[in-house]
Image (cartoon, rainbow, N blue to C red):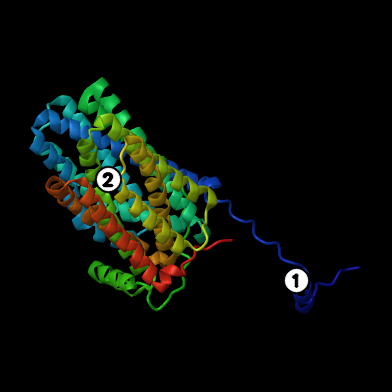
Amino acid sequence: MAVAEATPAVQSATAAATPLAAPPAAPPAHRDANVLRWLAAYTASLIGDSVYFVALGWSAQRAAGPTEVGLVMAAGALPRAVLMLGGGVLADRLDPRRVILGSDALRCLLILSVAAGIALSTPALWLLVTVALVFGAVDALFVPAVGALPPRITGPDQLTRVTGMRSLSMRVGQIAGPPLGGLAMGLGGPAAAFGVAGLLFALSLPLLLTVRVRPLDTPAAEGAPRPGSARADLLDGLRYLRRHRLIGPLVAVGAVGELGLTGTLNVGMVLLNAERGWGPSGYGWIVACFGAGATAGAALLTVVGRLPRAGLTMAGTLLAASTGAAAMALVPSLWTAAVLAAAVGLCAGVSGGLDSSLIQTATDPAYLGRVTSVVMLTMLGLAPLSYPLVGAAIGAWGAAPVFLACGALSSLSAVVALTSDAVRRAELPGR
């Protein structure tokens, strides 16, 4: 006896009566193989960056005097600053993974070519300046694309973890790169050091090729970018940032905080150490403790994944970091300064990570490359302007009043955060 086919009504009723299986939850970012492959590629690239800067600096020192060394080391900053906003437009127009792949491939070819050229002749000053300029230009494409990629490889609730993982990766690059570059210089000279940097960029390429990137999951809102000129896209991105109730204040908070803290911690700490007579080892302890604190902050965000009342927590930890940085010029002993540096690093790591995570989660992914380019421009272009000012001010008035002034400026960023209702109420997405 033939069995009659179920009618559409019966099929519909049966489907309604049968509960649908929920899709399996994605693993946390620090256990997601796709995210970890991206992180490994990013870490290899960052270590390559550090080795490259060691090779560039020592090669310049062998080829010329101190003034020329400074010129070579600063040469890459100009194209990076000028082209950064354009790099953000490109990251939003194209698949950011392809931009990162192209950037690392270009850096690999550039640095390996330099290594081959230096192996055959003495490094010339013009060659090193050219390399620095080209490297800086490629960096202007790489940095915004790195900021635009996370929403395409993980969910919104995992972006804080990814921010923490990126910070940990940066610390690994800062710790592992210089010794590796120094070892390569000692064993094989500049050619070997440039060669190691190029191979690290090459290592990132196959890892990036295995990373799965999903299309943007964003509604076609009225404000979404439409096809047009690069200039129109750039202006559209700047308008989006300016009009957004949360992102605009967050970018301002980060910019003012960097302006107050960066000069104090990078230039002021050297001069404070000399003023107190703590010596090179004392400076090393302070920097190491700050780095350990910042690493602990990044690890906290990686493991926890979400902190409640993120906007207020960001403002509070930023205020604590600013106050601690100002107080470092007032403490009497090296060990007190080192412990305070660890606390400042921890608070700055948490605050910076939360600021970045809130920007990542609040930004429409279609605009993330352009928003990232503005954020990085304030860090790489604006904050270093404080270096000569901090140095000259400490030379004129001593470390204590300058540290207090810079701490007050950085504390102003926390005030900016607290006066914004959107920042005070900001929360990170969670499961």
In the displayed orientation, state which residue is furthest to the front: 332
Task: Indicate left or right for 27 with 72 as reference.
Answer: right
Where 66 sits versus 236, above or below?
A: above
Mark 2 sits on what residue? 329
Q: Position of residue 201 (x, y in %)?
A: 33, 39
- The answer to whether 10 appears left or right of 77 in the picture is right
Q: How many marks?
A: 2
Given the image, on which type of amino acid does mark 1 rest? Answer: Ala
Q: CA distance from mark 1 to mark 2?
A: 71 Å
Q: Does residue 193 lie above or below 252 as drawn?
A: above
Q: Residues within 10 Å of mark 1 (few under 14, many from 20)?
A: few
Residue 45 appears in the rendering:
no
Q: Quadrant of the N terminus?
A: bottom right
Q: In which quarter of the view is residue 56 placed?
A: top left
Residue 297 seen from this side: yes
**Front disc: 1 or 2:** 2
Residue at 25 percent of width and 48 percent of height: 264
Residue, x 18% and y 46% (percent of image)?
76
Position in image of residue 2 (x %, y %): 87, 68
Q: Earlier in the sequence, mark 1 or mark 2?
A: 1
Mark 2 falls on what kind of element?
Answer: loop
Q: Is residue 86 above or below residue 2?
A: above
Label 1: element kind: helix
Q: What's the mark number on residue 15? A: 1
The residue drawn where x is 22% and y is 57% is: 382
Which residue is at 50% across, 61% downward?
156
| Residue 53 percent coordinates (x, y) | 24, 37
Q: Quadrant of the C terminus?
A: bottom right
Tag 2: residue type? Ala
Q: Position of residue 33 (x, y in %)?
A: 53, 45
Q: Quadrant location of residue 40? A: top left
Front in this rendered view, residue 116 or 53: 53
